[in-house]
Image (cartoon, rainbow, N blue to C red):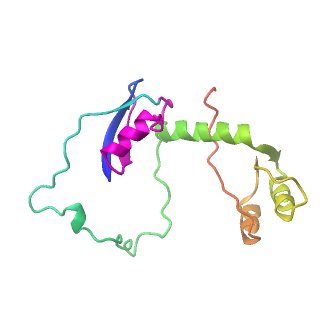
Amino acid sequence: MIHYDLRCSAGHEFDGWFKDSAAFDRQAKAGFVECPVCGATEVAKRLMAPAIPRKGRTRVKDLPAVPPAPPAEMPATAPAAAGPMPAQVVALLQRMRAEVEKSCDYVGTEFAEEARKIHRGESDRRGIYGEASDAEASALREEGIEVARLPWVPRADG
């Protein structure tokens, strides 16, 4: 795997991992490498310094294959870091919201019941989105119905 620092035609900087440099070249030429901020597909590699470990420091290949267990005092599910969400994450979530709204039916507070109807074959099979409490989402999962919660950010267009 190779890690590249990248810059889109609009000047946004981001990074990406690729199998090798040829994989990056193929994907970039096909328009598959996309800026997470603006969606531009005209992307170039930035000048990077090689990752050479200092003398006496652990090299990546010397690290254990499985990450060590967290310390005993660390809770199993640590809360998310506080602070503003990075702009790139907001942009990706806005694009995801737009795709959900374009491709799925909004069913509002009837989400759990409509998901059950679709699961039982009583309603047309299709993508839906709406509101469900934690208890409703948990009950759907226990019934074998796949559901996912998405962070719902404001639309990109305001």
Q: Which residue in the rendered view is the most extreme toward the top?
A: 10
Q: Which residues are magenta?
A: 12-40
Q: Quadrant of the C terminus?
A: top right
Q: Is residue 20 left or right of residue 100?
A: left
Residue drawn at 28 percent across, 71 percent down = 64
Horizontal and vertical percent position of residue 5: 32, 39
Q: With respect to residue 54, does 6 lie above or below?
A: above
Task: Give 6 or 109, whichever is nearer the viewer.
Answer: 6
Q: Quadrant of residue 152?
A: top right
Residue drawn at 43 percent across, 40 percent down = 27
Residue drawn at 73 percent across, 71 percent down = 142
Q: Which residue in the rendered view is the most extreme toward the right?
A: 122
Q: Quadrant of residue 45?
A: top left
Q: With respect to residue 32, does 139 lie above or below?
A: below
Task: Give 104 or 136, whichever is nearer the viewer.
Answer: 104
Q: Is residue 122 magenta?
A: no
Horizontal and vertical percent position of residue 43: 39, 31
Q: Is residue 16 magenta?
A: yes
Q: With respect to residue 96, does 116 lie above or below?
A: below
Horizontal and vertical percent position of residue 157: 63, 26
